Amino acid sequence: IADALADQYADFVTSLQNWLVVTAGYVEADEDALYQSLYAPTKAKNFPFFEAALKKSTTGWYANTPELTHVDVFLAASLEWLTRLDKNGDKLFEGYPLMEAHYKKFFALPAIKKHVAERPERPY
């Protein structure tokens, strides 16, 4: 399950490449148009899949394991990145309460909390 979820998320991020390179400032294009035509519909198509995976979980981790797995790390770290790139990043989890709960759970882990506090600041 963990590998399948990670693959699904990788496909999601890969499908956003045109929006990502513009938003990150590598390519000049109409960011708002790409947000509406690419990012928003792709997010709307994929986030329900991840929300549904968490709905099936009794542990709060994506693969329903007792401890976090690579998919929890991958998604949480990538979603942190999206909160910085998405012009509406503060609303990233609207309509996806289980994804938000997972995100908060992950970043509340003592080792993760310590790492985030000590790491150098990066734009994304």
Image (tube, rainbow, N blue to C red):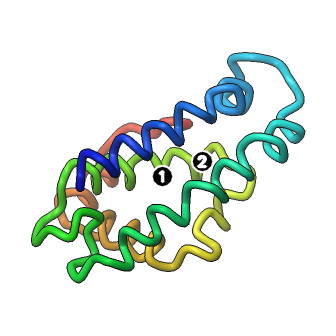
Name which residue lies at 32% across and 78% down. 56
Q: Which residue is mark 2?
A: 84
Q: Secondary structure at mark 2?
A: helix
Q: Residue furthest bottom?
A: 58
The three-letter code of the residue at mark 2 reads Arg
The three-letter code of the residue at mark 1 reads Glu
Percent position of residue 23, x then y: 71, 33
Q: Which image quarter: residue 57?
A: bottom left
* Mark 2 and mark 1 residues within 8 Å of each other at the beta carbon: yes
From the viewer's perspective, is 15 left or right of 87?
left
- Numbered circles on residues, count: 2
Percent position of residue 21, x then y: 66, 24
* Residue 75 vertical position relative to residue 17 in the rendered view, above or below: below
* Residue 102 vertical position relative to residue 10 in the rendered view, above or below: below
Question: Residue 71 shows which numbered tag?
Answer: none
Question: Residue 80 shows which numbered tag?
Answer: 1
Q: Secondary structure at mark 1?
A: helix
